[in-house]
Every structure is written in C-alpha cells, then in structure tokens.
Amino acid sequence: MSDETLRFDAVIGVDIKGETWSCVEIPGSAEFFGTGRAVRVDATVDEVTLTNVGAMVTGRGGHMISLSAKVRKALGKDIGDTVAVTVTQR
C-alpha cells in the first residue's frame, strides 16, 4: 500500500470501446499503484471527496475513477470539463 498521493488535472470522459464514460483517467496509475488490477482509493475531485472508491481498469493498462451523476452535479461539471484530482491508495 502506498501513502503517496498523486495529483493531476483530468478531463471528465474516458472512451471505453467507443462509448464515453463519465470517469477520469489516472495518469501513470499502473506504476503508481504497482498493479494493473482494480484498487480502492480515496480521491478528491475539485472540492468533492470520494472515500474508498474503486479505481477500475481501463483495459489499456491504466485506471479510472467513475464520477456519478450526483458527483458531477456537486461539481457543477460534466463530460468534457476539466477537474483537479488527488488520489491516495487505501
């Protein structure tokens, strides 16, 4: 388990098999987490805190965090908008 924190800006929207999912992709995630499998993380997206959420695999060797409609509403943002993300592995 890592106590390091990863900070990055990301555009909401990850292309998965031709569909755009309301997720943010975590850059360099396989190296950061030390695995290509799904992991549990704590994340802050802009000022919204997500506790113990799954960082799902993208199918391209990376990870992504899903942003539900409720989270997007709290952010006031949607697919195509940029957010500041902080991720810590649990």
Image (cartoon, helix red, strand yellow):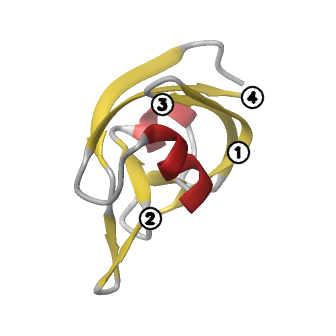
Sequence-first disc among 3 and 2 = 3
Quadrant of the rendered structure where residue 14 is?
bottom left
Quadrant of the rendered structure where residue 48 is?
top right
Sequence-first disc among 4 and 1 = 1
Sequence-first disc among 1 and 3 = 3
Is residue 28 rendered to the left or right of residue 11? right
Q: Which residue is mark 1?
A: 53
Using a 10 Å C-alpha cutoff, classify the residue at mark 3 as few (fewer than 14 neighbours), some (14 to 19) or many (20 or more): some
The answer to whether the residue labelled 1 contacts the one labelled 2, judged by CB atoms less than 8 Å apart, is: no
Q: In front of the other: label 1 or label 3? A: 1
Sequence-first disc among 4 and 2 = 2
Q: Which residue is mark 4?
A: 90
Using a 10 Å C-alpha cutoff, classify the residue at mark 4 as few (fewer than 14 neighbours), some (14 to 19) or many (20 or more): some
Element on which disc 2 rests: loop
Q: Which residue is mark 2?
A: 58
| Amino acid at dot 2 | Thr
Q: CA distance from mark 4 to mark 1?
A: 9 Å
- The N terminus lies in which quarter of the figure? top right
Q: CA distance from mark 1 to mark 3?
A: 16 Å
Q: In front of the other: label 1 or label 2? A: 1
Q: CA distance from mark 4 to mark 2?
A: 19 Å
**Along the line of sight, the residue nearer the viewer: 26 or 68:** 68
- The C terminus lies in which quarter of the figure? top right
Q: In front of the other: label 4 or label 1? A: 1
Q: CA distance from mark 1 to mark 2?
A: 15 Å
